Image (cartoon, helix red, strand yellow):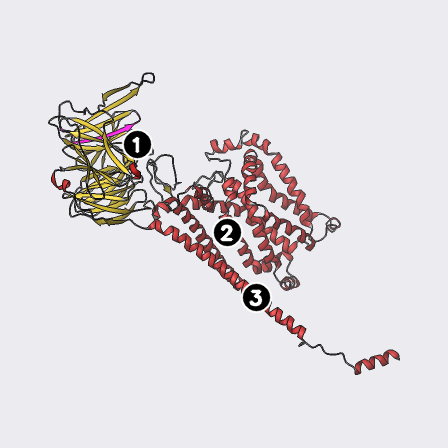
Amino acid sequence: MTDLANSLTASKNPPERIDFNTPALQRKRKLRALKDRLTHWYVLVGGLAVLGAITLIFFYLAYVVLPLFKGAELTARKVQSPAWLQQDAGKPLLLALEEQNMVGLRVAASGDVQFFSTRDGGLIKRQQLPLPAGASVVSFGQDQPGSPLVVLGLSNGQALIFKHSYNVTYPDNQKTITPQVSFPYGEAPMVLDAQGRALEHVALSVDDETLVVAASTGSQLLVQQLVSEENMLTGEITQEQTGIELPQIAEPIKAIYIDPRQQWLYVLNGRAHADVFSLREKALNGRYKLLEDGEREVTASAMLLGGISLMVGDSKGGIAQWFMARDPDGSSRLKHIRAFQLEQSPVVQITAEERRKGFLALDAAGHLGVFHSTANRTLLVESVTDGSGLLALSPRANRVLVEEGGQFMPFRLSNPHPEISFSALWGKVWYESYDEPKYVWQSTAANTDFEPKLSLAPLTFGTLKAAFYAMLLAAPLAIAAAIYTAYFMAPSMRRKGKPVIELMEALPTVILGFFAGLFLAPYVEGHLPGIFSLLLLTPIGILLAGFIWSRLPESIRLRVPDGWEAAILIPVVGLTAWFALGMSPLMENWFFGGDMRLWISNDLGITYDQRNALIVGLAMGFAVIPNIFSIAEDAVFSVPRSLTYGSLALGATPWQTMTRVVLLTASPGIFSALMIGLGRAVGETMIVLMATGNTPLMEANIFEGMRTLAANVAVEMPESEVGGTHYRVLFLSALVLLTFTFVMNTLAELIRQRLRKKYASL
């Protein structure tokens, strides 16, 4: 009765209502709203800042890279023509500029050497060469570009060799350049033609202690060799001059060139032919036709820096590059490499740069062209005179001087990056001394006449190769592990296993690269049969263990809690690895003669490098697995349980539910995981840097190394000159890498959205 009375009393007095408008709750709501707004703006500003930073990085890279593709600029400088040039200067044969662009050299046909100021044209020094009585200068020749040696062919069959140099001093803190002429082989001319005929063409080459001088008179070829030897005890220098007998030329000679290694003698003769002689074998290598068009003839020629390439200009403005290359049979032949076009007038002079593989050409109509051989690039074509003149290019290739009609016409040349073109970066290029066009990256060398090889193709190929082998290992393992962990594994085991795998991502990549380069690479080399057996036996062992487990009695299988079956595979994988690696020496003796590496190299003809793509795939795949696993596992685990339960309720098996419902629903997330893993593999630096030989090769061979774009930037950026071509090409590599990542992420997002829209109805 008491309980009934209490209940009736309670029904008459209902509980008090909660007032949601109290000051305390209002303050909480305002504080929560303030936090929401702050968080909203924090996320918005942070996201915009990230996008802005990426955009700024992109534009900065573009800002550094764009000057690479800028052409040359020629600016005229006004200088009053000096009186001495118009009075008694004589007919010019040679015009040159010194390093500082302050002093010019002019050699007249009378043997008069004139040094003048390039600023005002004033005469600095004048010197008459010691020509024999009654002799005059008929021709001249120079050593390779950058050499100060000049040889003059005289009308009496002799040749005079002199050297022009410039001494820099600072009296009273004023920079002063003193030009001088010296005679390293004596002031007495060298006799080339005993009959005293005029030397119409001359050339020389100096290599250590050997001087070779070649000349021609009509169609007759004359070659002399001067060998200097120094007595180590007395210091006395003896010289021995000998003649080199070569087959004679049938047609009139137009030009003669000797390569710096004194191996080849090039003789241009007739309308458009070149005879190439081997100075070592003293025989004719071959007679080559330079022009196929019968209406053209050779009008000018020159050797490029290094003396390997021969540039030939014709009567219709064409310029062709030729150099010696080996045929498939191993014999060297003069081959046409590439062609350039100035205008339609005959080319009268070709002048090579002294530090790059570029050259300038001047035609009879006064058009000046600036070209680069390796890049196959025409940088500038501009009219500078009204007719043909004499051209000089400064050693730094930033000043041009033209003499025409008794006047000097100086120009300032801006041509900072001629080596770069689309074909040089991405196409096959026929480099000097190569037998065929190739993709090559070799940015520097020890010699000054080096031809930079800046192809990004092998670096891009190496980037994709490293990413491919890394994903080949990481993608199947990570995706399979993610599916099993999220769908089949027991929750308690998942809480232990997932953090362990994600913890792998915390390992520094430099440690992984160090481990791969110093331990993994030599270990794999010594256990190749075991490594490949392990890759084959591991999936077989897992399938076999699963089959045996399914055939065991239920009394045994039920002892293992549901979702913990994966723990059984740990000893299976361990035993499989122990068996495969333990059998490696025996398999190597049975099948590969005791050394599988030698068998791969000798019997299969496949190059094997210790640090190769296989090592990169193992090490970088290990580093990429956590990224792919974590995102893919979250995507699978996030599939609504209602879909899973509905599928199972309709009679589908767990495997059918997983393949036809769970995977399709989680496919956008899985695809994103793969793309993020690919991006990580493409941008990886330290593992590739330490686990490969860093050789920029375009070979799909898994046993050869590679060099990636990121590793190349890391290796060469500290050694590059700020603002130089090499420096900007490295920035171009970074821009290519950023663009590739941006394009891949954009495509991944588009595909992800399409997959989400397609399977949203599940």
| Local secondary structure at mark 1 | strand
Q: Nearer the viewer, mark 2 or mark 1?
A: 2
The residue to which callout 3 is attached is: 38
| Marks 3,1: beta carbons within 8 A | no
Is 550 on the left or on the right of 257, as rendered?
right
Asked if the residues shown at circle 2 and circle 1 are in contact, with their CB atoms under 8 angstroms apart, the answer is no
What residue is drawn where x is 59% and y is 46%? 507
- Seen as rendered, the residue at the extreme front is 172
3D distance between C-alphas at marks 2 and 1:
46 Å
Q: Which residue is rendered at x = 56% and y = 32% of the image? A: 588
Calculate the distance from the C-alpha at mark 2 to the C-alpha at mark 3.
Answer: 32 Å
Amino acid type assigned to the residue bearing label 1 in the image = Ser
- Measure the alpha-carbon separation of dots 3 and 1: 75 Å
Task: Determine crowd level at label 3: few under 14, some 14-19, many 20+ residues with C-alpha closer than 10 A.
Answer: few
Camera-near label (2 vs 3) is: 3
Q: Which residue is mark 1?
A: 332
Secondary structure of residue under mark 2: helix
Circle nearer the N terminus (3, 1): 3
Q: Is residue 761 magenta?
A: no
- Above or below, 629 relative to 135: below
**Image quadrant where one finds the N terminus:** bottom right
Q: Quadrant of residue 310?
A: top left
Rendered image: mark on residue 679: 2
The residue lying furthest to the right in this view is 1
The mark that comes first in sequence, 2 or 1, is 1
Where residue 622 sits in the image (x, y, percent)?
57, 45
Stretch in magenta: 198-208
Is residue 608 rendered to the left or right of residue 323?
A: right
Q: Residues within 10 Å of mark 1 (few under 14, many from 20)?
A: some
